[in-house]
């Protein structure tokens, strides 16, 4: 069980996402999770061993380290990535529930059911409308909240995003104010700023996706209201055009990863 | 053999679970297993090396560490994850038994994963066991470490330490944060298990009652 398993789970959600959602997922996996695993973990790997205080007093180093780093950057990022990925599971569960309902209808031999076999139901891609629209929009909203909360937590806990070289500590049992030196402060600052920048990009992508979904929703509503006033022949032509447009917008990317199975 | 095995096991269980059961599996994957592997394991990695006592007496540090941490938090966490996931195997075995029986008797195709009859009893037992194990581990954590707090300093006077010695635990705040996280997710899983239990009992009681009522009507 590792980040690869998360990739498998979220890959399934990718199929039912908008284009912006797919870009967000790519940014998440390449610029955040991969950077965390391949680079950042190594930079912070020796953080307590190489945290050196100018004293021989046993225990002083432990206590000072604990005082300045209540929770390590790397753990906070891991938690942030897990929390930010979780709302996408809501969408995966909703899709799984819909598939389950369709399979049930198919098995009962419901004449309304338009599928030829169970495999077609499994492969079907659901459009983001109706209750799925609400689930999807809520998941984006939750993601935004989590991203903002974690960025604020970072800023609040570490007084900004810079890692200082030297910290002065006078927590007991240090005999007086002691100089403590952080290992690799510049490299850590660079990675911190990088991760914050990518978080900001993800926040912007989420806001853009939210706006896109809202605009699409209102456009669809106004079209429906417009169509109901017009004549039946003209109505059919407009509906067909709108359906084609929606198909084009929704089918912009292809997914090859097997998703969260029901 | 690694956590991937547990993940595959739970994915199999997912197929035969109710909606609440699937939420439980998702929480175990994301908030317990993934957090354990990606974050928590590394915090406790060098806990013995970083445990420091204010004394040069050989053996004193070892003895004090052993006294205060009979079983490390992280090992208890791993045991909890494994033992809490195991009752779900009962359901998998029962479904496999049903499928086997169907094959031999060549009965007409009936969904072997449908939660009714004997499988319902097995499912309920697995839920009760899961909840029981969660509570046992939470109580164990509480009793072994006198609550869920991790102090910065512990005082130790066990032989061969010559007198009462100050010993400092590494990263106590970070460990405490993750311990609270563990407790919170355990409690959430207990609530989900109890909800699922109530839901299944209520659903099947209503079904039985309706059947009897229909029979009486006829």
Image (cartoon, rainbow, N blue to C red):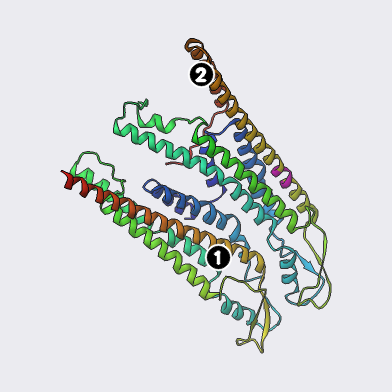
Chain letter belonging to callout 1: B
In the picture shown, does residue B122 fall above or below A254? below
Real-space CA distance between mark 1 and mark 2, rounded to the nearest whole angstrom = 63 Å
Q: Which residue is at a point 40% across and 54% down the rendered structure image?
A: B196
Q: What secondary structure is found at the residue carrying circle 1?
A: helix
Chief secondary structure of the magenta portion: helix
In the picture shown, does residue A212 fall above or below B57? above
Residue labelled with disc 1: B74
Determine which quarter of the picture holds residue B121. Answer: bottom left
Horizontal relation, residue B86 to residue B95: left or right:
right
Horizontal relation, residue A262 to residue A228: left or right:
left
Q: Residue furthest left?
A: B218
Tell me where the magenta segment starts and ends, as one range: A195-199
Residue labelled with disc 2: A228
The location of residue B187, given as percent across then percent down, is: 50, 61
Q: What secondary structure is found at the residue carrying circle 2?
A: helix
Q: Which residue is at a point 67% across and 70% down the rendered structure image?
A: B170
Determine which quarter of the picture holds residue A31. Answer: top right
The location of residue A7, given as percent across then percent down, is: 55, 43
């Amino acid at each position: 069980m590792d980040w690869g398993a998360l990739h498998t789970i979220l890959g399934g959600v990718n199929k039912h996402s908008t284009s912006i959602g797919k870009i967000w997922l790519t940014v998440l996996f390449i610029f955040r999770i991969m950077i965390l695993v391949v680079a950042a973990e190594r930079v912070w790997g020796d953080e307590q061993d190489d945290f050196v205080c100018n004293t021989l007093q046993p225990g002083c180093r432990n206590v000072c380290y604990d005082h300045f780093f209540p929770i390590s950057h790397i753990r906070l990022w891991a938690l942030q990535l897990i929390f930010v990925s979780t709302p996408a599971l809501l969408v995966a569960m909703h899709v799984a529930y819909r598939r389950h309902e369709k399979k049930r209808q198919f098995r009962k031999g419901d004449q309304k059911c338009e599928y030829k076999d169970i495999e077609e139901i499994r492969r079907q891609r659901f459009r983001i409308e109706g209750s799925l629209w609400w689930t999807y929009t809520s998941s984006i909203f939750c993601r935004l909240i989590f991203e903002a909360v974690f960025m604020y937590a970072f800023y609040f806990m570490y007084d900004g995003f810079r890692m200082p070289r030297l910290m002065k500590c006078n927590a007991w049992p240090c005999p007086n104010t002691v100089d403590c030196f952080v290992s690799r402060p510049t490299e850590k600052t660079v990675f911190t700023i990088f991760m914050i920048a990518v978080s900001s990009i993800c926040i912007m992508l989420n806001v853009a996706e939210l706006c896109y979904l809202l605009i699409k929703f209102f456009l669809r509503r106004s079209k429906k209201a417009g169509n109901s006033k017009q004549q039946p022949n003209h109505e059919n032509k407009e509906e067909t055009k709108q359906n084609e447009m929606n198909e084009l917008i929704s089918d912009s990317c292809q997914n090859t990863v097997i998703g969260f199975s029901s | 053999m690694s956590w991937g095995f547990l993940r595959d096991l739970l994915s199999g269980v997912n197929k035969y679970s109710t909606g609440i059961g699937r939420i439980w599996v998702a929480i175990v994957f994301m908030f317990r297993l993934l957090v354990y592997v990606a974050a928590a394991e590394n915090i406790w990695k060098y806990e013995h090396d970083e445990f420091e006592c204010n004394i040069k007496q050989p053996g004193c540090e070892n003895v004090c560490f052993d006294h205060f941490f009979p079983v490390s938090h992280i090992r208890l966490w791993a045991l909890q994850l494994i033992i809490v996931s195991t009752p779900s195997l009962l359901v998998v075995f029962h479904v496999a038994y049903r499928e086997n029986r169907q094959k031999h008797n060549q009965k007409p195709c009936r969904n072997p994963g449908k939660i009714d009859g004997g499988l319902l009893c097995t499912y309920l037992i697995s839920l009760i066991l899961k909840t029981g194990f969660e509570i046992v581990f939470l109580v164990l954590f509480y009793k072994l470490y006198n609550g869920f707090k991790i102090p910065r300093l512990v005082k130790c006077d066990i032989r061969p330490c010559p007198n009462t010695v100050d010993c400092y635990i590494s990263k106590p705040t970070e460990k405490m944060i993750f311990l609270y996280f563990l407790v919170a997710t355990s409690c959430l899983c207990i609530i989900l298990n109890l909800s699922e239990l109530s839901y299944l009992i209520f659903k099947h009681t209503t079904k039985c009652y309706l059947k009897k009522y229909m029979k009486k009507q006829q």
